[in-house]
Amino acid sequence: MKILNEAHVPDNITVNQLEKIASRIFEANRTTFADNELPIEGTEHNRALCITVKCENYFVTRVLVDNVSSANICPLSTLQKLKIGTERIHMNGVGGRGFDGKGKGSAGNITLELVIGPVGFSVELQVLDVVALYNLLLGRPWIHAAKAVPSSLHQVVKF
């Protein structure tokens, strides 16, 4: 509102032009997604949102961003592929339950340094010894801490 109150508005400006200027000012403080950001197939896809991140100087593909998950998860096999030793895992008593309804004990938690786009994060993940279709899962704890806005429709994460 301060910007609008202090802006010089020419006498000959139309209402439509003023509305466009004002909407641009407000858009600068909001995260939005536009139709031109849709993948080629548009709204016809039902893919999960998987991104690539840089983790401990390696690029990691198939990182699932899941706003339904209440945990950040790292399969033990991912740590092995990244050559990260188990001595970095801190033991905990946390368990989880998968879609199959079976409980899985956590091997512990680990903090990994991730770079997503231009932004770096220190992320705590639960380490599980499970077979997974993803290499990392970033759930609500990461989404909220990063103030991220994921869109599986647009296949992008914005900050």
Image (cartoon, rainbow, N blue to C red):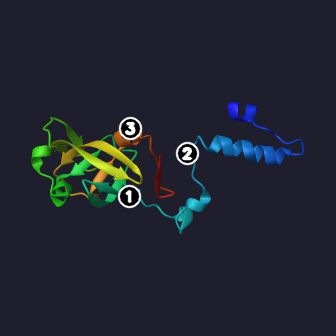
Q: Amino acid at mark 1?
A: Cys
Q: Is residue 60 above or below residue 95?
A: below
Residue at image x 49%, y 64%? 45
Asked which secondary structure carries label 2, the reply is: loop
Residue at image x 29%, y 43%? 123
- The residue pinned by badge 2 equals 31
Tag on residue 145?
3
Q: Residues within 10 Å of mark 2 (few under 14, many from 20)?
A: few
Q: Pick out the residue farthest to the bottom.
A: 40
Is the residue under label 1 in contact with that under label 3 (CB below 8 Å)? no
Q: CA distance from mark 2 to mark 1?
A: 19 Å
| Res 143 seen here | yes
Residue 48: % across, % down: 41, 57
Q: Is residue 71 above or below residue 75?
A: above
Q: CA distance from mark 2 to mark 3?
A: 16 Å
Is the residue under label 1 in contact with that under label 2 (CB below 8 Å)? no
Residue 158: % across, % down: 48, 49
| Res 1 seen here | no
Name the quadrant containing residue 109: top left
Q: Amino acid at mark 2?
A: Thr
Asked which secondary structure carries label 3, the reply is: helix
